Image (cartoon, coloured by chain):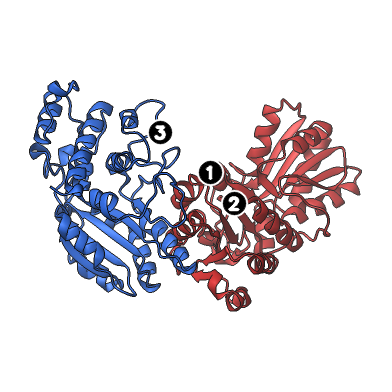
Amino acid sequence: MTDTDELALRLRRHVVRMCSRGGSSHVGSGLSIADIIAVLYGHLLRLDPAQPDWPDRDRFILSKGHAGACVYAALAERGFFDVSALDAHYRNGSKLSGHVSHKGVPGVEVSTGSLGHGLGIGAGMAFNLKRLGGDQRVFVVLSDGECDEGSVWEAAMFAGHHRLANLCAIVDYNKLQSLGRVSDTISLEPFGAKWRAFGWHALRVDGHDHDALRSAFADRADNRPTCIVADTVKGRGVSFMENQVLWHYRAPRGDEYAAAMRELGVDIAAAGDA
Amino acid sequence: MREAFVRALSELAAADERVILVNGDLGFGVLTDFIERFPDQYVNAGVAEQNMTAVACGMALTGARAYTYSIGNFPTLRCLEQLRNDVCYHQADVTVVAVGGGFSYGQLGVSHFATEDVAVMRALPGMTVVAPSDPWQAYELTRQLHRRGGPAYLRIDKGSAGVPAGDIELGKARQVRGGGDAVVFSTGAILGQAIAAADALAAEGIELRVIDVHTVKPLDSETICAAAAECGHVFTLEEHVATGGLGSAVAETCAEGRVPLKSFHRIGVGDSFPDVVGDQPYLRAHYGLDATAVAKTVRQAVVD
């Protein structure tokens, strides 16, 4: 198991635990992006947890803010704050809202939650960093359903036109959105071709294959932004959550929590976490 | 007025390379010089206001001092959520510039009337809201807004009130005419109608004090409450719906300040869309916002 595989497993445990303890929704969304987030935070992103505002850092935006639990977990694992702080997720008086928020949370660049905002902000960051001659990269994770938003394509046109090669979008293409299948709602296909038509370098990878993700992140075009369409499984890692819209909403409790954690290699009774 | 804004912005851009103008594909002729002089501090985001605003926010979050520019409701209502979630929640240094406040684009129709913008912008947490009356104010307040930093909203009228240049301070209401029988608070270029109404009333022996509230947020409650208490009869005038804008702001601050009033009247557009075609003076008269209408409203209240 590589470091990022190990990190992804820990992120999944955190996500399930946070959603269970907080009673929060979107556990399936957090599990869907766990491998992408693990490769980004465990391998790729240039960050300094001791200096969250380090000007030369790469920027990461979770545009699908509802999967915020996974990013909070990654920041804790990277040392931006203590892992114990994750217990506050969704709690009264806490900083860790269900949709990712930057206020009082070191390492979160941008608060999101309303879909269709992150790519435009990322494009503005990439534009300005490029203008200043910096070599920072900007990464934005979007959901597939989010690509229904017209603002995503406004940003895509802008980034393509301005050849923002320092911008990388990753679409968590788990094929499920709020009420059902993406293909039954607003079909995105041909998806990669759409991004290419907007002036992007587009790749399609298995979003749970860390080697493939690492290769995709390294496969940059000189003068175009990159979009990685990552095929994923909503709820990945917990068999009864996989490909189920239900787990966009439901929080795992009691036996469900124990069963989910068991699949992730944790006996909660033995761990004193029941 | 927009030329005065561009002149101020050009000076700011020359002095600070962090200044960047993100344009919503408008300003034909007006921005030509800026674009030529500052190619690295300008980008046309196209006809895409949501993205214009998000991009400006991203720039600001990486150290830029960003300005968005468009007309009417396009840089405000069209991208309201980007202003709320992206710009305001992140306290991003973005100043939104809308040319064409109120009925500036008179004959162009309802789509081009900015008549709810002040109400909506002032509801956004942390947003400064400014409506200059004249080009000299637009120039000076642009510079003062820059010192303060965003989030900010600058509402640029097409016309001007004709008030002579003088001292002005962001956040401080400005008395432009004395009087003790009644007071009218006005924002933007329609201030000229308030002054003309005061002139007409003076000939009848009614002294109407005129106060320019160029900064609607943060509101200068102290000046407003003091003038309201002294005059008793209070009027507000704005080229904007009477709901939620200056009139509401003044009413709120007078009520919270327990200012005893003899009467209170908001002069603004009623709860309907303008459905006649006309230029700005025509529409002001049609909707009861011109000097004649203001004088009539004041006269009725004071004489009664």
Looking at the rendered structure, the secondary structure element under dot 2 is strand
Residue type at tag 3: Lys
Q: Residues within 10 Å of mark 2 (few under 14, many from 20)?
A: many
Q: Position of residue B48 (x, y in %)?
A: 43, 64
Tell us which disc is closer to us: 1 or 2.
Answer: 2
Secondary structure found at label 3: loop
Rendered position, A15 above or below B51: above
* Residue under numbered circle 3: A95
Q: Can you tell which chain is drawn red?
A: B
Relative image position of residue A189 (x, y in whole percent): 17, 64
Cα distance in 3D space between marks 2 and 3: 26 Å
Judging from the image, mark 1 belongs to the subunit labelled: B
Chain ID, blue in image: A
* Kind of residue at badge 1: Leu
Q: What residue is drawn where x is 54% and y is 46%?
A: B120
Q: Amino acid at mark 2?
A: Ala
For residue B124, the mark is 1
Q: Residues within 10 Å of mark 1 (few under 14, many from 20)?
A: some
Marks 2 and 3 share the same chain? no
Residue B189 on image: x %, y %? 71, 57
Instruction: Using the numbered discs, state the Cα–Cα distance from disc 3 to disc 1 in whole angstroms.
Output: 21 Å
Residue located 21% across and 63% down the image: A216
